[in-house]
Image (cartoon, helix red, strand yellow):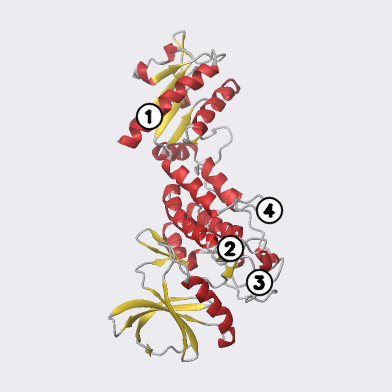
Amino acid sequence: MPIPKKIRNYRILRQLAQGGITSDYLAENEELGKKVMLRVSNYPTDKKKRLLHVAQLHAKLSHPNIHDLYDFFEAEGFLWSVLKHIEGQDLQSYIVQHAPLKWKHALQLVVQASDALAYMHRHGVVNGSIKGKNILIEEDRIYISKFNAARAIPDDDTMPPDTFIGNRIYCAPEQLQGFAYTTPKSDIWSLGVVLHEMVAQTTFVAEEQQEVAFNDIPEVEFSHLYPPDLPYEVVELINSMLEKNVEKRCSSCDELSQRMRTLLSSSTAFLVMPFHPKFQKVREVIKNVCDKLGVNYYVVDEQHETGDIVLKIRSNIQKADFIIADVSPVGSEFLRDGKPMANSNVIYELGLAHGYNKDTIILTQDLLTLSFDIAKENAVIYHPDRLDTLEQDLSKFVVTVTKRLKNS
């Protein structure tokens, strides 16, 4: 569509982005000498009531992670929004360039969007169209920028009851079953898709659609697309956002932000131990200790993992803040010169950890397995029948290590 070189006091400099519904332009207010973003709508002007309502919802919001709206008007046959100029790019482009992101970086970005959505929901607004294209990023700062499908809570009659504006892949199931069912939890689903795109190899660049029929729910199974080295707690978080049953989905963006901040503030341990039935209860003790102390943990099950196991182990050790390793002998086959010997895989992984200068907590049922250069003060000696003592001793070591890491 032809765009004038000047609209009101704004001189249009260049196009910034082209979307299915809106186009963005860099412009300058000639009276103030101030650069702004002009967003022109591709809607027909008979949709003015709807767009004015969306602009009113947007304008009443003021949050560090919501794109500031300065003005809204009709001119030259188009509807225009005047917004803060942001020197950045849309999040979808950023994801395509950088995915997969390290999970902590991804959470650092998404928690900002979650905070903004929590603020919107508290002020009676559902965004309804969260996706990477509708979010801007400027120097690791996130801005929710578009409100094309925004609605007031609980009732909003400005959207026709038989259509939905959006992209199928980002729409929660309940959104595609009728606009009246869109709730704050629908925004959580959409943000979950964006977070999944960030940490996974696959990005969902779905075709833009102006109208989506009811019950036209895309059958996308997200779980099998997770990278194998993603921490269990992060997988669990994303799964709670992408729960198809709205009643079981993460309850609010306030809760979501809190969970992400807990993950970001916690340390990460990599567990090194034999995958043998006799160590099952020991693994449960280690995981219980980590859960109670808010420590994330990685583990590579060599018996069931596929692909390059060594690469996965190296990657997990590099990402971990510290190592918990059980060097107890598995059985009589692990003997050297009549003395018990640690599992060879465990020794190999400990060598990698030493090469990366990782803090290491050693567990053992037999002190003789500490024949290599490990200070005894870093070792927890336990009896397999006294795992309550192991839990107490390990907890003390983990607290000491995590405090040291936070202060370093």
Image point (32%, 77%), residue name:
35
Residue under pointer 2: 170
**Element marked by disc 1:** helix
Instruction: Please tell me how crowded label 3 is: few (under 14), some (14-19), or many (20+) other residues with Cα within 10 Å.
Output: many
* Mark earlier in primary sequence (4, 1): 4
Residue shown at the point (54%, 26%) measured from the top left: 283
x and y percentages locating residue 171 in the rendered image: 61, 64
| Whether residue 316 can be seen here | yes
Mark 2: secondary structure: helix
Residue type beneath disc 4: Asn
Establish if 388 lies above or below 231. Answer: above
Sequence-wise, which precedes: disc 2 or disc 3?
Answer: 2
Indicate which disc, 4 or 3, sits on the residue closer to the N terminus.
Answer: 3
2 vs 1, front mark: 1
Q: Which mark is residue 245?
A: 4
Label 2 vs label 1: CA separation?
41 Å
Of tags 4 and 2, the one toward the viewer is: 4
Q: Alpha-carbon neighbours of circle 1 within 10 Å: few (<14), some, or many (≥20)?
A: some
Spot the residue most to the bottom: 76
Where does label 3 land, which residue? 212
Q: Amino acid at mark 3?
A: Val
Distance in Å between CA atoms under marks 3 and 1: 53 Å
Sequence order check, earlier mark of 2 and 1:
2
Residue located 60% across and 76% down the image? 210
